[in-house]
Image (tube, grey):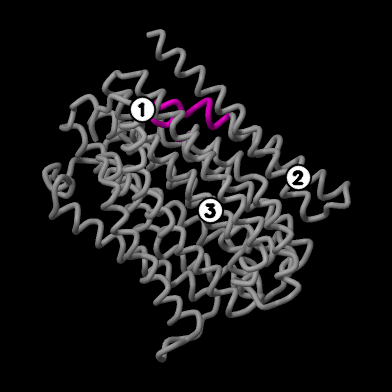
Amino acid sequence: MYETKTTQEKLKLLMKIVLPILITQVAMYMVTFFDIYMTARYGTEDLAGVSIGSSFWVPVYIGLAGILMSITPIVAQLMGAKKKDGVKDAVQQGIYLAVILAAIVFAFFFFGIDWLLGFMDLEPAVNDVASRYIFAMSLGLVPLFAYNALRSYIDALGATRVTMFITLMSAPINVFFNYLLIFGNFGFPELGGPGAGMASAITYWLVLAIAAFIIHTNEPFKSFGIFRKWTRPSLSRWKEITGIGVPIGISIFAETSIFSAVTFMMSVYGTITIAAHQIALNFASLLYMLPLSISMGATILVGFEVGAKRASHAKQYSWLGVGAAVTLSVISSGILYFLREPIAGLYSSDPAVIGLAVQFLIFAALFQVSDAVQAPVQGALRGYKDVNITFIMALISYWVIGLPSGYLFATFTDLGAFGYWVGLIAGLTAGAITLSIRLLIIQKKLASH
């Protein structure tokens, strides 16, 4: 990374950083996307089971993995302040923490998932698929969390093309093992939905191996010696990482878990509604990779400029990110609205599922702009290391405004299941407004100093 002088130079650098992140995020998301897509082609019950399973898996994994995202602003600010000696220790401590977090999540799923599923009124076949899918996915927790730590380090150095290359390899690997294990091709066992979880776990181990090899053998990563002379685990460094990371993780968990909570609540509407809802959510989440990637790029660039004590440059990067995301959201909304029938048809041949998914996709199109504002604003705030107030705002927006209003619309109006999506729109809009106000306050405070 380097200092820029003009707005045009900043926009060019932002796009240079963001484009590889976008490709990386899409490739990472394609693991879940193809799990859902290929399972949908296998059967409706397996699709519903994987949908329920991923609704447990995604928020827990993303929330805890979000803690490791703190490595990005920590390393970015170290690089901006020209304190390269501290990078190795920060990354190594992040890897230690990744292994511990993976062990905690594995224990949670191993001992608790059947108990949690017991609270849901699921068909026995759907319950079985969800349980076995989550267990299979859990076998890949250690490599998945460790890769998140390494990826945060790579991205913080501005080498986002490297993570793009690594992650691009994950999608075809996952599709290949899905083909073998979901459908039982070439003599492999036909596992259905749980086979998608096993394929993902295998993919995570292979991706970690590729990332570790590149970091150990190629510059600029090799010179930092990340895998040489390991330091002892340090509680003080873990405190720094978690001090920034826990609020990030809770904020991400608050946002992602509300979608899972909606999926759980929709279980009362039956298997077809769950499947249709998941189709709309799955494709909308794919388009969300656009603002999310800009958010991650904003964290890197804002963090670099804050470390270099260039407050005005950090401010410019913040709002350039928001502008770019909002512009792209208009395209996303158009895709969801005008192509909703072909999109639904990609996932299922069941007319009932397709008809309902088409209606859900209309609501998905409506919350694209709110997503496009709140995501890059959160990314900028992480670059400033302002995370505590942010996660409180996220909790209020999604869980105090979004979910309760969704329940009210679903229960006391004729909207039914669609009422929950109206609640999602309300929560995301509230988050976009409050987080933008917080960003303005932080920038004003930093400029005054």
Look at the picture and state if 33 lies above or below 99.
below
The residue that label 1 is drawn on is 7
**Range of residues picked out in magenta:** 378-392
* Label 2 element class: helix
Q: Is residue 99 left or right of residue 405?
A: left
Residue 385, by quadrant, is top left
* Label 1 element class: helix
Viewer-proximal residue among 136 and 6: 6
The residue that label 3 is drawn on is 287
Where, quadrant-wise, is the N terminus in this rendering? Answer: top left
Residue type of the residue flagged with mark 2? Gly
Residue type of the residue flagged with mark 1? Thr
Q: Residue at x 46, y 28 (%)?
A: 319
- Whether 403 is among the magenta residues is no
State which mark lies toward you, 1 or 2.
1
Query: Percent x, y for residue 265?
Result: 73, 55
The residue that label 2 is drawn on is 406
Q: Residue at x 81, y 50 (%)?
A: 410
Query: Percent x, y for residue 229?
Result: 12, 45
Task: Looking at the image, tell me whether mark 3 or mark 1 is earlier in sequence order.
Answer: 1
Viewer-proximal residue among 290 and 208: 290
Task: Looking at the image, tell me whether mark 1 or mark 2 is earlier in sequence order.
Answer: 1
Q: Label 1, label 2: how many angstroms apart (C-alpha)? A: 41 Å
Query: Percent x, y for residue 164?
Result: 32, 55
Where, quadrant-wise, is the C terminus in this rendering? Answer: top left
Q: Is residue 269 visible?
A: yes
Q: Residue at x 65, y 34 (%)?
A: 397
